[in-house]
Image (cartoon, rainbow, N blue to C red):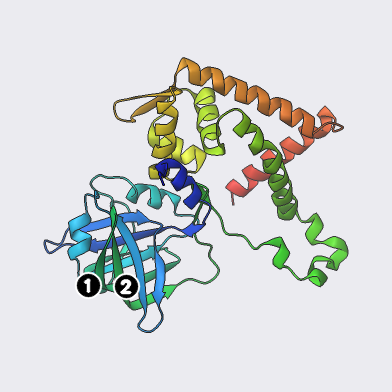
Amino acid sequence: MSIDTRDFRNALGKFATGVTVITTHDTQGEHYGVTASSFNAVSMTPPLILWSIDKGAYSLDAYCQAEHFVVNVLGSDQVPISNRFAQRGENKFQGIDLEEGVGGSARIVGAVAHFECRTWQVYEGGDHFIIVGEVLKYGYQEGRGALVFHNGRYALPEPHPMTIPQEEAETGEGLLGHHFLYLLRQSLSAYRQDFYPRLEHMGVDEKEWRVLTLLLDRGALPLETIAQRVAQPIEDLKDTLSGLTRRGLLSDHDDHVSLALTDAGGELARKLLQMAREHEQKVFEGVSMEEMGVLKGGLERVIGQLGNL
């Protein structure tokens, strides 16, 4: 069976994972860090975990030969750290608050959990090596959310409404049903279910839609800015950009220093934007322009208020 790599990646993206930064150092004392979502538990007795590293990774030898490493599970506010360690380059650790972990590997301050490991075994795994570690020490923070990777972008973990007992949901004259966050979540879910299939009819998915409309609105942008605006990890974003480039919708210059829409990409983005406007008008039929202004204005003020907290 022939498998399309990009489509296979999309399928894997349906499985939500956490986001980690794995750190280690070599015999010369040079520190290494790489973003990975392949972290998983293996055994309770002895306590074993695993993660995998691409055979083409610059730091491959350092990790495969290391005696110790640390798995830093990132918090929901640590997207910049994830993006930093997802890229190749020097001085990844510059400006990052660190502590010394087992064997001298770096432990990132503020991570919601960390697992300090001794390398147990390294296995072949296709185009990756699978590294199994024995957990020697660990720690975690209560009351903080972890960063999540789902559907090719960063996400936040939230309690599912179906897990809330019915008696709690019905207290306070329907407190849950009128709670701001619950209403936002429900409306967003319903809107997506109706809107995303329309994108498919026009030959794009939701990740491509975000990139196309962003570049239509803002013009050419560097890779890092696009990743931040669409909340997509850089390595996954590169896959999205490659697909758009192959279809002649996106041109890049100087190795992703600046990315811009082609004429065909701009034409498609304008059609997508017009479709989105028409869809919004249909969804809000029966809602007056005044009510729409109040709704959007209120949401903008909430966003601004939360940003100032």
Residue type, label 2: Glu
Q: Quadrant of residue 74?
A: bottom left
For the residues marked 1 and 2, what is the alpha-carbon distance in whole angstroms? 9 Å
Residue 116 circle label: 2
Label 2: how many residues lie within 10 Å, few (<14), some (14-19) or many (20+)?
Answer: many
> x, y percentage for residue 122?
24, 67
Q: Residue at x 29, y 55 (%)?
A: 126
**Foreground: 208 or 281?**
208
In the depicted structure, whether residue 299 falls above or below residue 276: below
Left or right of 75 on screen, residue 26: left
Image height of 35 relative to 73, above or below = above
Q: Position of residue 279 (x, y in %)?
A: 72, 30
Count of marks overlaid on the render: 2
Identity of the amino acid at label 1? Answer: Gly
Q: Could you tell me residue 190's position as x and y percent? A: 73, 45
Q: Residue at x 39, y 31 (%)?
A: 222
Badge 2 element? strand
Q: Is residue 99 above or below residue 212?
A: below
Q: Residue furthest left?
A: 28
**Mark 1–mark 2 CB contact (< 8 Å):** yes
**Which residue is denoted by mark 1 in the rendering?**
103
